Image (cartoon, rainbow, N blue to C red):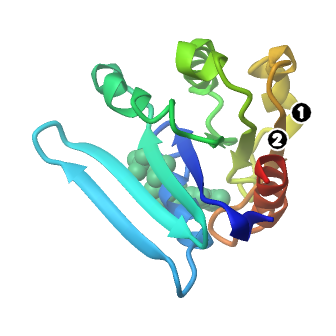
Amino acid sequence: GLKKKEARILVLGLNNSGKSTLLNQLKNEDSKIISEVVPTVGFNVEKFKNQNVGFTAFDMSGQGRYRELWENYYKDCEGIIFVIDSSDKLRLAVVKDELDLLIQHPDIVAKCIPILFLANKKDLRDGMSSIKIASSLHLERIQDKPWHICTTNALSGEGLQEGIQWLTQQIC
Ligand code: GTP
């Protein structure tokens, strides 16, 4: 199981998708939050360890010029959590662009790592369903990696365990 090995998980998503809230939900008494800020570029990297799983979160949005920074982490990661704000219809096209860049990246193409999509903010009234999000992002085209989508409320933690369980099963 998970306890036997270390796993490095990348948490990716646009700003405001809920990455920090999600990481806060996952933390427990034993875990350490390490926040790194690169002040010169104002680029935020959030790191978090839960048992043997290390989580590193990056904000993918609008910061194309910092892309090289988080791309460095692709080689070493063993799984990806891709967080989507399900209430943000306007930026779903931006999410798709970022997803395209991610899954076409040579370091990601080269490996068969699981991708967990979290359709977050399911509590909001205008939230899109996971089916709608999956079809908008054309997730069905991802055939060389296991992937899974579930809806979450990062504020309450609802849906999170199901997703994390799926991810750890894929890795271990
Ligand atoms: P950046 O740090 O800008 O990259 O954002 P982030 O992806 O870390 O998002 P963050 O966790 O800061 O959440 C953004 C806002 O959405 C905050 O006001 C959260 O409280 C809120 N939020 C996060 N998850 C949920 C959710 O499931 N439901 C609702 N209603 N609000 C949420």
Identify the image quadrant of the N terminus: bottom right
Number of residues whose C-alpha sits closer than 10 Å to that of mark 1, classed few (under 14), some (14–19) or many (20 or more): some
Q: Is residue 80 left or right of residue 141?
A: left
Residue 129, visible in the rendered structure: no
Amino acid under label 2?
Answer: Ile
Give the residue at x 56% y 40%. Answer: 77
Give the residue at x 44% y 36%. Answer: 73
Q: Is residue 28 above or below residue 25?
A: below
Q: Is residue 28 left or right of residue 60?
A: right
Number of residues whose C-alpha sits closer than 10 Å to that of mark 2, classed few (under 14), some (14–19) or many (20 or more): many
Q: According to the image, label 2 marks what residue? A: 149
Q: Is residue 118 above or below residue 168?
A: above
Secondary structure at badge 1 equals helix
Between 60 and 133, the residue placed more toward the observer is: 60
Q: According to the image, label 1 marks what residue? A: 131
State the image coordinates of residue 79 (x, y, percent, origin top left): 66, 42
